[in-house]
Amino acid sequence: MSGRRLGVGFVGAGFMNRFHVLSLAGVRDADVTGVFSPTRAHAEELAALAVRTGVGAPKVHPSIAELVADPAVDALWIASTNDTRVAVVEEIVDAVKRGRGTLLGVACEKPLARNLREARRMVELVESTPLLHGYLENQVFAPSVVRGKEIIWRRAVPIAGRPYLARAAEEHSGPHMPWFWDGERQGGGVLNDMLCHSFEVARSLLTAPGEMREAVRIEEVDARIASLKWARPEYAALLRERYGGAVDYARAPAEDFARASVALRAPGGEALLIEATTSWSFVGPALRLRTELLGPEYAMQVDTLSTELNVFLGRRVHGAAGEDLVEKQNAEQGLMPVIADEPAAYGYTAENRHMVQAFLAGRMPDETWRDGLAVTEVLMACYKSAEDGCVVRFPADLTEFTPKVALGTWCP
């Protein structure tokens, strides 16, 4: 398909798809051609953002079926709420099987689903069609992570041996929208929302270039969850007030901290370890992503708040609360880190470039829904370990397991 451009349609018009639209300014062979959201005003806002950004003039569609049928739409990016994912894919697959459109592929934002049963259904649905499928895990594509991995595996590993420990952490002060705080709709708390990032970026660093992700075999998962901040009475009340009663952590809290230790085995028999930490209770300048890779004679590290640009704003510089300097900004004064191009720094631009090029070439992306399924299995093992206070050994049958947080019965 040399010279062809990919028409991208968006399912959902919230925070994540706004990031995807902005990132497409750095992708040369794609245009935003369609948008669907159950809230039409949100779809129109996303379409207007695409026009302002110069990445397309998308049509707003009244349904997913109409979006699929649009001849200008070649692929779909799914970033609807977690509780709608299966229904969204069912509608896409039904439209494709009835010949409503000529899609090449679908990409789905993390996490793939709320639990293993739903994730298996997602994979079953997409694999019942000829559609290519990509799992949107942006941190795997972050330029600093990609470059660090390339250097370590090219220069250090051939001499000293493969790495044995990967650490990854994602921390901020809490989500933007009320449904993220709802254990049932989201599938859990911070573990389901963000440890999916930390585990997959760590797994990718421990996997050799060109090696299948499953080459590093999971053996054990040991995890812990807690509600350190937001279940406290004063903060539960703050959440309830902020979201007009839509979030009630006094009644049904979700975890705002999670950590996991995942033991793996390399193809050569070497023991490997992933340490992942995530938090919605981090109070700092903004979103903080930290990644480390350690081996016998080397180490690499990434910290997104160690920025090349900082600004200082004194006491007399007042402004409304916002995120005009960096995502999840927690202050408007003082010494502030600034990320000049967040979509690029966090990996969205490279991720979307990869997905677009893979779909145009007619090949599966490097991250597929099978990877999303594997990540979901680890997340469920983490919840099971945290609930039972024990190590979960693989293989484990977690298909029918639903975390207590997602059932609304968890007590911190």
Image (cartoon, rainbow, N blue to C red):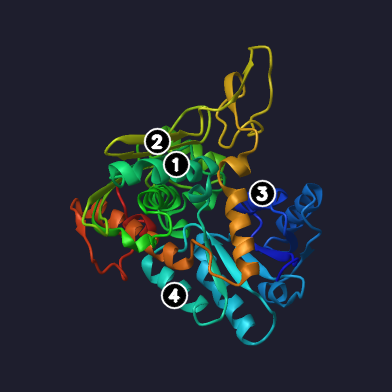
Marks 2 and 1 sit apart, C-alpha to C-alpha, by: 9 Å
Residue 252 seen from this side: no
Task: Say which element carries label 2.
Answer: strand
Figure quadrant of the C terminus: top left
For label 4, the residue is 121
Residue receiving disc 2? 300
Instruction: Between label 2 and label 4, give the one nearer the viewer.
Output: 2
Camera-near label (1 vs 3) is 1
Which residue sits at x=44%, y=50%?
A: 197
Query: What residue lies at 41% left-to-right and 34% top-to-bottom?
Result: 301
Q: Amino acid at mark 1?
A: Ile
Q: Residues within 10 Å of mark 2 (few under 14, many from 20)?
A: some
Dots 2 and 1: beta carbons under 8 Å?
A: yes
Question: How far from the left and from the top, in percent, is residue 88?
Answer: 57, 71
Q: Distance between the Cα atoms at labels 2 and 4?
A: 38 Å
Residue 395 point in image, percent of width and height: 23, 66
Instruction: First in sequence, mark 2 or 1: give its number.
Output: 1
Quick one: label 3, few (<14), some, or many (20+) residues within 10 Å? many
What amino acid is labelled 2 in the image? Met
User: Mark 3 is on which residue type?
Assistant: Ser
Left or right: where does residue 346 sit relative to residue 58? Answer: left
In space, the residues marked 1 and 3 are separated at their CA atoms by: 25 Å
For residue 1, side relative to residue 207 (left or right)? right
Q: Which residue carries the number 1 mark? A: 151
Is residue 401 at all visible to an observer of this figure? Answer: yes
Kind of residue at disc 4: Arg
**First in residue order: circle 3 vs circle 2:** 3
Closer to us: 139 or 194: 139
